[in-house]
Amino acid sequence: MLCLKGWMNMEKIITVQGTGCARVRPDQIECTCTLTAPNPDYAKAMATADAWMDELRIALAAVGHDPDALRTSSFRVRSEYENRRDKNGEYQRVFVGYACVYELHLTFALDLNRLADTVDAVARCAAHPELGIAFTVRSTDAARQTALADAVQNARRTAEALCAAAGAELAHCCASTRAPSPSTTPRPPALNFRRI
C-alpha cells in the first residue's frame, strides 16, 4: 500500500500491482526420461523394465555420470488395451497386457559436450526412452530478489502516475504482499499503496 498526501487532507490508500523480471543464464541441464516396458505378462514387463533401467544406468556411467545421479520421479504399472474389430466389424477394447513406466531425471552442470554424450548414450539403449531436455538455473534466489525489486519499482511508477492524475502526492509504501509462486519462475508482489 502507498500512502498519499495532499488530497483534501484525508488519508487515502491506493492499491497497485507491480510486475518484475530477472534474466539469468542457465547453469545446469535437466534431462527427463520416460522408460516404458510393455508385455502381456506382468512379471515379464517388470523384469524388462528393471533390465532396461540397469542398462540405462550403465550407459550413463560410461559417459561420466554417477549411476546414482539418475533419479526416479515416479513409477507406475498400467493396463494396456487396443481397439480391435470383432466379427461384426465393431470396435472392441481388448486387453493386451501391462506397461511398467519409469519417469526418471538426471541433472548436471551446463556442458554441451557432456549433453551430446548423454543423448547419444540414451539413444543407444534398447529401451529407447523418451528424452526431454531443459536448461535451468541451480539457484533462483538471486533472480527472485531481482524480480521482486523490479516489481516494487514498477508498482511505484504506476502509483506515481495515478497520484499525478488525481492531484495527490505519493507519501510512502504502507504494506506489500507477494503472491506465492507455484513454479520456479518468480512472480511479482502485489503492493498496496495508501494515499492521504
Image (cartoon, rainbow, N blue to C red):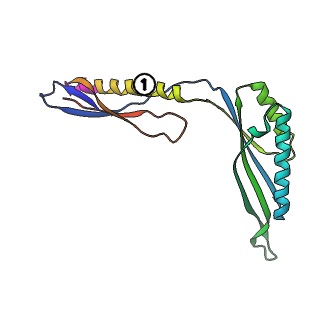
Task: Locate the C terminus by quadrant.
Answer: top left
Percent x, y for residue 170?
24, 23
Q: Which residue is mark 1?
A: 149
Closer to us: 94 or 192: 192
**Residue 27 position by quadrant:** top right
Residue 137 lies in the magenta-colored region:
no
Percent x, y for residue 34?
74, 47
Residue 166 lies in the magenta-colored region:
yes
Neighbour tally class for label 1: few under 14, some 14-19, many 20 plus, Cα within 10 Å = some
Q: In the drawing, does residue 68 fall left or right of residue 135?
A: right
Task: Locate the N terminus by quadrant.
Answer: top left
Q: Residue at x 85, y 56 (%)?
A: 47
Percent x, y for residue 6?
16, 24
Q: Residue at x 52, y 29 (%)?
A: 141
Q: What is the span of residues highlighted in magenta in the rendered image?
A: 161-168
**Amino acid identity at mark 1:** Ala
Q: Secondary structure at mark 1?
A: helix
Instruction: Give the dominant element type of the magenta stretch: helix, strand or loop.
Output: helix
